[in-house]
Image (spheres, rainbow, N blue to C red):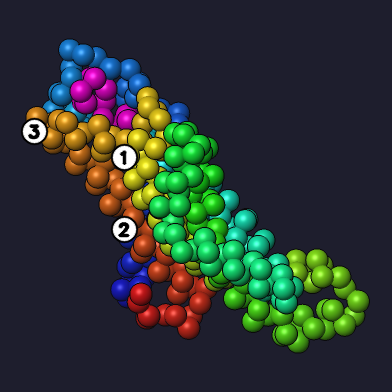
Amino acid sequence: MGLKNTNAVLGGALVGGVVLLALVGLVYTPHDPLEGDLLARFSPPSAEYWLGTDEFGRDVLSRLMAGAGVSVAVSVFSVLLALVLGTTVGVAAGYAGGWVDRGITVLVESLMAFPGLLLALGIMTVLGPSKWGVVLALGLAYSPSVSRIARGAALSLRQRDFVVASRATGHGGLWTVFRHVLPNCLPPLLIFATSIFGSALLAESALSFLGLGVPPPLATWGGMLSESRNAMDQAIWLAVFPGAMISLSLLGINLLGDAVRDLLDPRMRGVTA
């Protein structure tokens, strides 16, 4: 098995494991992730609490499972929102051209002057901590990058023979966009979506770590890392396990993203960022 196939299998296994953990956590956890037992606070990993407990006696494994669902859901919806907004704006700019393209490009470039996480931080400062607020903030933060990809693809397609022929036969702009332009924009957008999915997961964890993400008592990996800061000397597992989950998830997403890139864009095969 080649290196690329190995990376694809490993990436798929890691991402699949995280998704499976999130799905199982929706219907079953060994203990209630929100209910604590003060008599069992800071218990090390044991037969009853496989990954130990936190300062409130809550089961770390149960909170990791519940947090997986939150992190995956927020990341997925953030990426979907960014794709919808960015693709709509980018394709409109690239296909229309002229002053529409120039105006949208100026706006997109202005937004891209701010790093995505910094823009999300600003939005969350206004909205306040909430799960759907994080989705909105990250979706808006990543949509300018998606828009630039979609615009470039639409520009390259606007003068292609099949698009010109569609207009010449009397088909309207919307029909031509949805029938010919948009389907051919999807491969680069899907490749880019895999990269921003990892960024969205990391950004959600960072926002929760800073207290601007999903508010407690809901479990999130970033929130668990934040809560572990004051107990590092007596319960190191509180930081190790959520940190490991974030790291393994990002590794799996990056490996799987490379496989998707090689599949959808063979010209990039063997090229590394």
Question: How many labels, in total?
Answer: 3
Q: For residue 260: magenta? A: no
Residue contact between numbered discs 3 and 2, judged by CB atoms under 8 Å: no
Residue identified by numbered label 3: 233
Q: Which residue sits at x=83%, y=79%? A: 166
* Closer to the camera in the image, 142 or 235: 142
What is the distance, in whole Å, between disc 2 and disc 1 at their CAs?
Answer: 20 Å
Q: Which of the two discs, 3 and 2, labels the residue nearer the N terminus?
A: 3
Select label 3 or label 2 by which is in front: 3
State the quadrant of the N terminus: bottom left
Q: For residue 64: magenta? A: yes
Q: Which of the two discs, 2 and 1, labels the residue nearer the N terminus?
A: 1
* Horizontal arrangement in the rendering, residue 104 relative to residue 194 (left or right): right
Q: Which residue sits at x=20%, y=23%? A: 55
State the quadrant of the C terminus: bottom left
**The disc labelled 1 sits on which kind of residue?**
Phe
* Residue 61 visible in the current orientation: yes
Residue identified by numbered label 1: 209
**The disc labelled 3 sits on which kind of residue?**
Asp
Range of magenta residues:
53-65
The single residue placed furthest to the right in the displayed view is: 170
Q: Which of the two discs, 1 and 3, labels the residue nearer the N terminus?
A: 1
Residue identified by numbered label 2: 251
Select label 2 or label 1 by which is in front: 1
Q: Under tag 3, what secondary structure?
A: loop
Q: Under tag 2, what secondary structure?
A: helix
Pointer 2 local density, CA inside 10 Å: few below 14, some 14–19, many at least 20: some
Residue 149 image offset from top left, x and y in percent: 56, 70
Select label 1 or label 3 by which is in front: 1
